[in-house]
Image (tube, coloured by chain):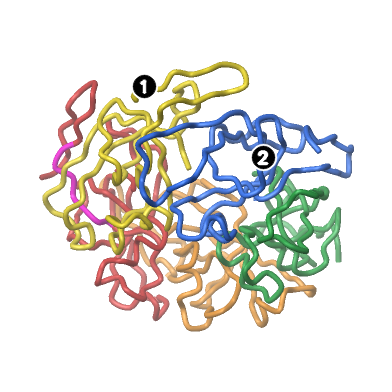
Chain colours: A yellow, B red, C orange, D blue, E green
Amino acid sequence: MRLANVTGTVTATVKSQSLTGLKFLLVDYTDAGGKVIDAARVVADDVGAGVGDQVIVSEGSAARLPNGMAGLAVDATVLAIVDEVKTKARRAAAKSG
Amino acid sequence: MRLANVTGTVTATVKSQSLTGLKFLLVDYTDAGGKVIDAARVVADDVGAGVGDQVIVSEGSAARLPNGMAGLAVDATVLAIVDEVKTKARRAAAKSG
Amino acid sequence: MRLANVTGTVTATVKSQSLTGLKFLLVDYTDAGGKVIDAARVVADDVGAGVGDQVIVSEGSAARLPNGMAGLAVDATVLAIVDEVKTKARRAAAKSG
Amino acid sequence: MRLANVTGTVTATVKSQSLTGLKFLLVDYTDAGGKVIDAARVVADDVGAGVGDQVIVSEGSAARLPNGMAGLAVDATVLAIVDEVKTKARRAAAKSG
Amino acid sequence: MRLANVTGTVTATVKSQSLTGLKFLLVDYTDAGGKVIDAARVVADDVGAGVGDQVIVSEGSAARLPNGMAGLAVDATVLAIVDEVKTKARRAAAKSG
């Protein structure tokens, strides 16, 4: 899974039937300190995350395992909102929670 | 999923039976501001996208979940045409819609 | 899918039974202009491609969807030989076809 | 699979039902010498690994094959704690075991 | 698939039941000339490869298709030992075979 910061939302009127009802979040994948590693991934959301939240994203077929995602053509889903990232060197306060 | 700009089309007469009837779009994966992150992906299309559109692409087995893609040997499909990307810092106008 | 140039072949006598009968091509993944993005992928072939051809490669489980690949342990297969790549900016002549 | 060093833990109260009961480790993917190649992956754990351990991580659907991970929406799981990495050039002492 | 050089072995006493009986090789993914592209992947082995061999590795679910890998939580397996890599520009002697 990837640590990510929710940076925005993406709206689309013309959308595949395989994504019916889905809302899209825009996230950046980061390291524990918030430095962006991979920018601008579009993800589904299973936990009600919002802009500014630090989250955990699963990719691939794992993204479709939550009940709400079954059968949808998503390849990345927010599965948790981070409370705290504890590392050996330091204790990084999460941006939400 | 990935934000992408449709930059062209790819034609192929000699084609696997596993791709029968499929048309190919050429896209660049970009960040929210349109900067290219990963260039030149060839993708299937479930929504009638065209050159110049900003789109959302799903990769992996998700690419085969739309009805029209079932059983085809595709690993990336356009699933939506972007209306708008809203980010914390700014509101980026989509290139289409 | 990826645009690729076929650059060579790979031969192997000691081979898993899960690859019985399979021949390997060596390809470079490129952008529309032929610039190498990811070098030296070993791929199966469903369309009779040869060295010098510009091709389209599917990765992951999609690589095993062509009839001839069912059950083989391949993760990338050539599915088409490119006739032409048309982009907004220019019309790139394919290296084959 | 990837060689990784466990660098921390991630806690989350708001969590998808598809991750019920799961604890998250934070790891860096490294080379044999411990140099970080890909930072800050969040992983599940099937072997009781802790911070400071050198481990092996499987990604993708492989991450859900251990009994304890069946049906959980994870895409990366620690499957072993490394005793020793032996390379041609040198014998690298593992950080644990 | 990827061209790879086997550079070492990895041993682990504490190991998931989903890897029972499995030995791990350490490989570097290379280009046709032996230049390292992606270092330090841990892989299973279906062909009896050893340190110094040039091999072909399949990733993802393909890694579990060989008989001996069925049900094991591996995401990369050596499937062939390379005899020869022939490229347009030159004929690269394999390091083994």
Q: Amino acid at mark 2?
A: Ala
Provide the residue designation for mark 1.
A95
Q: Which residues are magenta?
A: B78-84
Q: Quadrant of residue A78?
A: top left
Total count of labels: 2
The residue lying toward the viewer, choosing from C56 and B65, is: B65
Seen at 71% across and 73% down, the residue is: E68
Provide the residue designation for mark 2.
D49
**For the view shown, which residue lies furthest in the front direction?**
D21
Q: Please tell me whether residue E58 belongs to the stretch shown in magenta.
A: no
* Chain of the residue on which disc 1 is drawn: A
Does D32 sit above or below residue E17?
Answer: above
Dot 1: element: loop
Seen at 48% across and 21% down, the residue is: A33
The residue lying toward the viewer, choosing from C8 and E44, is: E44
Q: Amino acid at mark 1?
A: Lys
* Chain of the residue on which disc 2 is drawn: D
Count neighbours of disc 1 (C-alpha within 10 A) and say few if under 14, some if 14 to 19, many if 20 or more: some
Q: Position of residue A34 (x, y in %)?
A: 44, 23
Q: Quadrant of residue E65?
A: bottom right
The residue lying toward the viewer, choosing from E58 and D6, is: D6
Same chain shared by disc 1 and disc 2: no
Task: Mark 1 and mark 2 in contact? Answer it, CB < 8 Å.
Answer: no
Q: Position of residue B15 (x, y in %)?
A: 40, 75
Q: Position of residue C65 (x, y in %)?
A: 46, 75
Does E38 sit above or below residue B35?
Answer: below
Q: Which mark is residue C58?
A: none
